[in-house]
Image: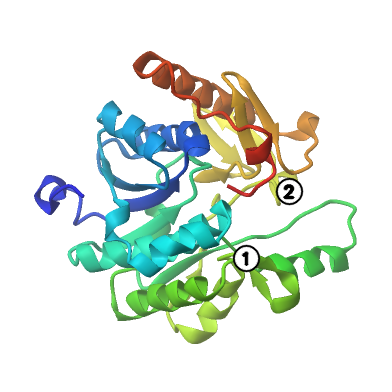
Amino acid sequence: MEPEAKMSTTLGSENIFCTILSKTRVYQGLALLASLKQVLAEDFSLFIHCIDLASYKLLKKMKLENVHFIREKILDESIRNLKHERKIHEYCWTLKPVICDYLLNKYPSVKRITYLDSDLYFWSDPTSIFKNQPDCSVLLSIEEKYRPNVNQRIVQRKSKITGIYNSGFISFKNDGIGVKAVKWWREKCLEACRIAPEEGIFGDQKYLDDMPSLFSTSCDIATPGVNVGPWNVLKYQFSNVDDSVFIDEHLLVFYHFSGLRVVAKDKVKYVHRVNRRKLPFIYSLYIKAITEAVELVAKLDPDFNGFADETALQRYW
């Protein structure tokens, strides 16, 4: 971990983010970083925890600005052991609250920590999310499912399994309730972090349903343009106005490219069933960003291969 002094210019900001990367998520992680730079310039820090040595060595070699690494040695031995006991995607889910908790403890001057899935891409400044709800200790992304011509009972049944919220973007303020909420989520994920609908468990995500009742200043994010993804993309009209992306009349803050896997330089596959003809134009822009990341890596380390193979296509991470 780099010394705190190196981050003194941004630690007072609310734009402190963290993410978790594996070898097959490096290209998407670089696209995420590029999008943050586009919308926030230099006013942010992104903490990355790499779960394998290959991704860490590559990213460290790249000397990325605004990036700081969280090394595995900061994890308790009992947590490190889970890497061998759980499936790789379950282990990554488990680490989400672990990393958030670590950063809030390590850097008490940080105003808030926001976890980002590596397959997010920002189209406008996320600072609006925090400014619009400054008194919220926890900011939760509603995963509003929308499928035209589908019985709403089926949609509701799906939500009952996966949860009300999506854990790809979750933000914790560094106050009493925010810290308690992170620790509670951490303990739940350490207990169990698998897909087991019959037990009321859906990875790290289903636990979030209980946060508003347990922690009084937990809030649903009210800012439009947040947590748009395959689950509700058909609900919106996408447009490009003066180089800004809108959904209906609102700026798109970020899009969650969930289920997309990079299998070659300019080729992706979708884990979830999608109608490619109905995907918005931002998908082609995202694939361009991914291609640029692949080319950047290839110049630095031609032997690095972060493409998803058949095994990777069968898992959540």
Q: Number of numbered discs present?
A: 2
Residue at image x 30%, y 80%? 176
Q: Secondary structure at mark 1?
A: loop
Q: Which residue is mark 1?
A: 194
What's the residue type where badge 2 is placed?
A: Lys
Residue 235: assigned label: 2
Packing grade of label 1 (10 A; few <14, some 14-19, many >=20) is: many
Image-quadrant location for residue 245: top right
Horizontally, residue 51 falls left or right of residue 309, namely left
x and y percentages locating residue 281 in the rendered image: 65, 28
Residue at image x 40%, y 66%? 79
Horizontally, residue 54 falls left or right of residue 251, namely left
* Along the viewing direction, whichever of 53 and 230 lies nearer the viewer: 53
* Along the viewing direction, whichever of 226 and 306 lies nearer the viewer: 306
Horizontally, residue 297 falls left or right of residue 287, namely left
Image-quadrant location for residue 165: bottom right
x and y percentages locating residue 92 in the rendered image: 49, 55
Residue at image x 44%, y 84%? 216
What's the residue type where badge 1 is placed?
A: Arg
